[in-house]
Structures are given as structure tokens and as C-alpha cells.
Image: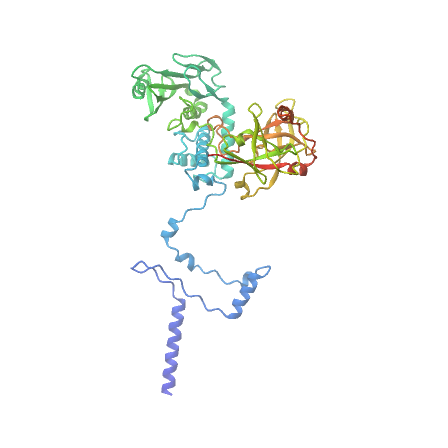
Amino acid sequence: MRIVGAVLVLLLTALAASAQTDNAPSPAPGAAGRPAAAPAAKFRKPGVRAATLRTRSGPRATPSAAPPADPAPAAAVSAAARKRAPAPPAAGAPAGPARDSASPTAAAQRLAIQFDLAWAGDYSGLINGELNDKTTAAIKTFQRNRKFKETGVLNTQERALLAALAKAKLAQVGWTMVDDSVTGARLGIPAKQVPNRSHGKTGSRWSSPQGQVQVETFRIRDPGTTLASVYEQQKKEPSTRKLEVNLLRPDFFILSGMQNLKRFYVRAEFKDGEVRGMTVLYDQATENIMDPVAVVMSSAFTAFPGVTGTAGLAQIGAPPQRKVEYGTGIVVSAAGHVLTDRQVIDGCSVIVVGGYGDADRQAEDKATGLALLRVYGVPDLVPAGFGDAPKGADKGADKTADLTLAGIADPQSQEGGGAISTLAVKLKGDAIEPAPQPGFSGAAALDASGRVVGVIELKTPVLAEVGAGGAPPQAALVPAPAIRAFLEGQQLAPAAGGAGPDAAKAALVRVICVRK
């Protein structure tokens, strides 16, 4: 009996130790830095496990049948590993710049955001397309002022609101880019604020009727002229200037502050012994309008057009051309003639019509922006059916017409695919709203009967001219009469094709441009 009792005591002791081991928490990392081990899986009855598997594979899961989630794997992830892992992009955020901050598209997006933030009055730094703390702070200010969560990253709704606000500001001041024939510089002018133009001392002058706002360009090319000497002169002349911003870089400088009772802003650039610049003067009563305008004018100022660099980065008219460009073409003859947007094939070393091979460039027209290609040895091409000019929008820009666009979006927009898609739009004058996505350059505009009444041209806006970056390229319509005239000049006439959206889609091809 004593032996049996001893055996029972040993068994009970072992069972108690086993229970303690099963219920003990995972050990903390040891002194040697070993990560905490996940606890052993709890014992489950075979029937429960089988029921769980059957439930997960069935049409509907039963919550009560699923085992509780084990938090141990999440707890086992070290803090260092979590810190190293990149945070996912916010929904709707411009993910391109975040993933590839050095890409031309990313730089263009950042430039556009900075321009728009400046128009909104939330950003006053250099508009240079760089990721910096000032831009993030400006985004947070924009979000805070509009009761959004301050993340420092714009989601889709916020980006659209910012672009719309910038567009409204552009219209409010009558923003336009002008070439100054006296100095050779290119600059942005708030035409509604300074409608009067005259000659200045060494440049041109724009002013409001009573002189509350004044803009003047200058050019200095005396022997021995240096940027530093002009910088020192501008700091002191006139003597009433009181500096608030004082920035000198190797190829440009910026000064701003008070001059008598007016605010002033000076931007000047240097090249080959010559300094070109502009001065903005405005009454303090106009600060709400002119403060953001002066910031944008500074970054939009191009003293030496065609020259890029630190001073000219923000004035690049359009993002660099892609090495591989995609557009849409419309078959206009059974002999293989394809009509497209001239911009699609600009600078191409190789042009390919998707599914049919290489294409020859037959003709281009700068006035209409059309281009004619041709593929050879392709039987059974069905040309599109052309109609007349769109009805409703031909009597003024305030008139509108309903159209359907048919085109082939960029492969990046459809996960590498080449599907033909349609979009309902409004035609206002010759502008298409909303503008379609990239790849629709050369797309067909269809009337209610499904006949082609125009070709779409997508124009990437000049950042300094329109701000509102991140917005899709602006779209314009080349109407059917202009198309007919262009084709007739090439001894072609639009063939009598079938009507209807399906017939129009059958005449569409993808145009691929490869640049060196």
C-alpha cells in the first residue's frame, strides 16, 4: 500500500507541474537577447479540430466553432522589426513619390503639391519638388484648417480639395505665364491684379490702376556684374527696405520684407555674367491675395528659359517624356492607316501598333495636333465610322454636349491589360470634362449614335501655369471637320464604317512609342 501511495503522489506532482507549465506566460527575452518563445499550442480534441477545418472550408463560417485567436505570434515580433517595417501608404495618398522619390513622376507630383499648397496660403518655402519638413508641415496646416486628421499625407479627398482650391485661386487672380520681350525672362502674372503694362527702367512693368500692386522685371549685364553684387545692391536700394527673408544661393537669390508701407518680394537669377530678376510690390491691404501669389511668382520665374537647375527646377513645363509611352489610335482605312494624337509619337525611335507590329510615321499636323501612322500587311482592318461635328457645343464655350470616349488606358492603369474602356464626358467648347486617364491620347469621341466626332488630345499642364498638380492631364477635342481636312490632305477620306460603340471599339488600337 505504501508503494501504491508513493506512486500516486508522484503522479499527482507530475500532473501539477505539467499544468503549471501549460498555463505559464511566455518568458521574456533573456540576457543574451533571445526572443521570447511562443507558448506551445494548447491540446485540442480531434473532434474540435476536425469541426474547425470543416467550418472554414464550408460556405459559411460559424463563429462559435472557430478557435480563439492566439496573440502569441504578434507578441513575438520584436519592436525593432516593427520599426524597420515600412508603414503602408495612406488610402488615396500619392504612393508614387513615397515608393520612388527619385522618379520624374514623383518629382512632378511633389512640385504640383507644393504649388497648390502655396496657392492655398499654407506653404511659403522654395517650390523645388523636394521632400522636406516644410512641405509636411504645410500639409498638416492645410488639414488642420479644414478639420481633417493631421497626417502630413494627403488622401484622395484632400488632394482633390487642394487642387480645386488652387484652381479657384488661379482664376481669381487671372494667373497667366508671359514672356518678357525686354529681359527675355518668363514669369507668371496675376493679370486681374495688374492689368496695365508699360516699360520699366531695365525691363517691363505691370501695375494695378491705382498702383496698389506692381510687378517689374530688371536686367543687369554691366561689366563685372556678379550675383553677390546685385544681391547687396537690392538689399539696400531703396534705403527704406526692411528685410524679413534673405536667401542667397550660387545661382539665385530671394529677398522680401517691407518697403515704405508696401510689402516687397525680389527674385533674381544669374548666368554668364548677367542677372535677370523681378520685383513685386503690393499694399498690405492686399496681403491675403498677394502673399501666396508672390510665393508662386517667385518659383514660377524663369530668368533664362530652357535652362534647368536649382533655380529652374520648378519651372519645368512638363514632366520628362517617358521612355515608353502608350496612347490610342483609330483605324481610318482598310489599308492600315491609323490616326492618333501627335504628342503620343513625339520623339519616338520606334512606333508599334499593338497586335500588328511596327508602324511608319506618315504625316503630322502641328496646328491640329494629329498624326497619321500606317501598318503594312495587315488584312481585315475595319475603319471607324465618322460623323459630323458634335452638336450643342459649337455655339460658344458656355454650351455643352454629351459624348462618350472610347480608348485604351495605360497598362499601369489596368494591371498590364489592354482592354478598351469608355467614359461619359461633357464637351465644353473644345475642352473635355472630366479628363480621361493616361492612354486616352488619340482616343475616339463618340456621339449618341456611336460615330466618331473627334479625337482626344491629352495635354499635361505646365505646373507653374496651372498648379493643381496631381490632377489628370487636361483633355481637348479635335473635331471631325479638322480630322477630315487633315486626312484629305493625305489623299484619304474617312471610310464609311459602322455606327455604334461596338463598331467604334473594333477600330481602336493601342499605339506604343519607344524613345531612346
The answer, for residue 385, to whether it is visible in the render is yes
- Placement of the N terminus among the 4 image quadrants: bottom left
Q: Count how many numbered circles sit on residues in the image.
A: 0
Q: How is the image coloured?
A: rainbow
Nearest the camera: 132 or 151? Answer: 132
Residue 414 position, x and y percent, is 55, 42
Q: Residue furthest front?
A: 377
Residue 108 position, x and y percent, is 45, 33
Quadrant of the image occupied by residue 280 = top left
Residue 227 position, x and y percent, is 32, 21
Quadrant of the image occupied by residue 495 = top right
Nearest the camera: 104 or 263? Answer: 104
* Residue at image point 35% right, 18% down: 274
With respect to residue 491, does 36 lie above or below? below
With respect to residue 214, does 329 lie above or below? below
With respect to residue 99, does 36 lie above or below? below
Q: Is residue 31 left or right of residue 344?
A: left
Residue 165 position, x and y percent, is 50, 30
The answer, for residue 393, to whether it is visible in the render is no
Nearest the camera: 220 or 332? Answer: 332
Q: Is residue 178 left or right of residue 425?
A: left
* Residue at image point 38% right, 69% down: 21
